[in-house]
Amino acid sequence: MTSKHQLKLTNTLSRTKEDFVPEDPSNVRMYVCGPTVYDYAHIGNARPVVVFDTLYRLLRHLYGADHVTYARNITDVDDKINARAAAEGVTIRDLTERTAAQYHADMAALGALSPDVEPRATEHIEDMKAMIERLVATGHAYVAEGHVLFDVGSMEDYGRLSGRSLDDMRAGARVEVAPYKKGAMDFVLWKPSKEGEPGWPSPCGIAEPGRPGWHIECSAMAARHLGETFDIHGGGIDLVFPHHENEVAQSRCSHGSQVMARYWLHNGFLQVEGEKMSKSLGNFITVHELLETDKVGGRRWAGAAIRLVLTMSHYRQPLDFTEKALEEATALLTRWAATLDKCGLDGAPGEAAAALPDDLIEALCDDINTPRALAVLHRLAREARGGDVDAGRGLAASLAFLGLDLSGVRAAAEEAREVAADPALAARVDGLIAERKAAREAKDWGEADRIRDLLAAEGVVLKDTRDKATGEVETSWEVAQ
C-alpha cells in the first residue's frame, strides 16, 4: 500500500464496516454491474457509476494504477433489448451498439473513468454454458422442458447476502411457479429462445437453441476476468436480491468456494424531487437529457454539476435528486472555479496528485465518505480565497481527483456573461420588465406571470426586491448559467 491510510468499507455480506484487505495487493479486483443497453441511462443508473468510479480512483491512489482491475459489464442480451429492437425495426446489434456508445459518452461527461475491462454478455456465452454444466453435474441445477434452473434448495445458506431465510422467501415469493420447477424460488440459468430472438446452441444436451438467464451472465464474466473469488462487488441496493444473491449462489456452487466477492458494496436508492422516479409521474430523467437538452429547469447542466449532486450524500444513504440541488452544485462549482482563477490555477484533470490533502484521502478511506471529502474542499476554498496558494493547489488537485472537471461550468458561465452583455437582449428584457411592472400595477397578474414565464423559457431569471423604506418593487435580471 502506498498510503498510510486504512480503507474501511461497509460490507453488505457482514453488515459491518470492515478494514479492506485485498486478497492480492498487487492486483485489487472490483466488479460492478453495468447497463442493459436498450435506452439512455437514467440518473439512477448514474449513481453507482459515480460511486464506484470514486472508489476506483481511491484504490488506484492507494495501490497504484497498475495494480487495480475494474470490470463493469454490458448486458447485450435481454428481453427489453429484444422488445425495443422489434419496436424500432432495427437489429439487436444496431440497438446495442448505439446505446452502448450513448452510455459511454454520457458517463464520460460525468467524469467517470473507463473500466479496465468491459465484458459483453454475448461474448461470454461459452463461459456461461460451462458454468451451467458444472452446476448440473454437481447437483445444483437441473434440466426441465428446455430450461436449466438453479436448485435453490441445494444450497444451505442461500439468502445470506440479503439476510433472508429461505422459508421467509418462499412464504413471500412473487415469482413464476412454472410446472417444471422443483421449487418456487428456483431461477433460470438457461431458457429456450423464441422465434426472432437471439439464440445459441444449448448446454446439457438440450436440442433447441436458447439464451442465458440474466444472473448467470455476471457470474461467468466476473470469473473470466477477475477469478473465481475477487475483492469487491458493487451495485445498487435494488440488486441485492435477487440478482446478487443469485450470483453468489451460482458462483459458489459452481466453483466450490466459500465466497464470490469478499466485500459487497451497495449504493442507496435515488428519488427525483422527493418521489420515486417513474415515467408515469413525469420525473423520469436521463443523463442525456440533463446534458444535452433544456428539459430540466430550462437549461443544460454541466457533467460536473450532476456528479457533484450525486456525491453530496453518502453513497449508502437515499438521495433526492432535485433541480435545486443542481442549481446549488452549479453555483458552488462556479465559485470554486473563480477561486482557482484567482490563484492562477485551472483545476483541470491532471493537476499534481502530490498536492492532494491528507484529510481528503482520509475522508474517502472512511467508507467513501464523500460529504466529508467535500467539507475538505470547502475548507481549501476558504483558505485559497484568503490568499493561501498551496490551498488553491490542494483544491485543484482534489477536484481533479474527485472527477469534477470545471471546464463545463466555466464555459456555461462565460456563455451567460456574453449573452447578458448583448445590448439587444438587454433592451428587450428591460422592455418586457417595464410591461410586467405596468401589468402588476394594473393588477393583471396573469399578464405579469406570462411575461415572467416567457423570459424564464429564454433563460432569463427575474428577481423582485422590495425597498423597505419606500415599498417600491425593483426587478433585476440575469441569464441562468
Image (spheres, helix red, strand yellow):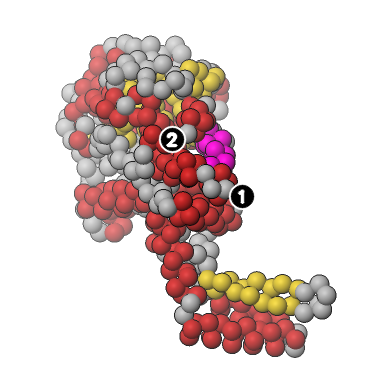
Residue at 25% x, 59% y: name it: 89
Q: Is residue 293 above or below residue 191?
A: below
Nearer to me, 250 or 380? 380
In the picture, residue 121 is in which quadrant? top left
**Residue 389 in the image, given as x and y percentages of width and height:** 48, 45
Residue at 43% x, 35% y: name it: 356
Label 1, on which residue? Answer: 274
Quick check: 417 left or right of 106? right
Q: Is residue 376 above or below residue 130?
A: below
Quadrant (top left, top right, bottom left, bottom right) of the N terminus:
top left
Residue at 48% x, 77% y: name it: 421
In the picture, residue 141 is in which quadrant? top left
Q: Nearer the viewer, mark 2 or mark 1?
A: 2
Q: Secondary structure at mark 1?
A: loop
**Residue 71 in the image, given as x and y percentages of width and height:** 30, 32
Q: Amino acid at mark 2?
A: Leu
- Determine contact: label 2, label 1, CB under 8 Å: no
Count up the numbered dots.
2
Quick check: 165 left or right of 261? right
Label 2, on which residue? Answer: 356
- Asked if the magenta segment contains residue 350, the reply would be no
**What is the span of residues highlighted in magenta in the rendered image?**
368-380
Q: Amino acid at mark 1?
A: Gly
Q: Residues within 10 Å of mark 1 (few under 14, many from 20)?
A: few
**Residue 257 in the image, given as x and y percentages of width and height:** 34, 12
Q: Secondary structure at mark 2?
A: loop
Outermost residue, right direction? 469
Q: Is residue 58 above or below residue 88?
A: above
Query: Would you say residue 264 is visible in this rendering?
Result: yes
**Residue 245 in the image, given as x and y percentages of width and height:** 43, 24
Of the numbered discs 2 and 1, the one sitting upstream in the chain is 1
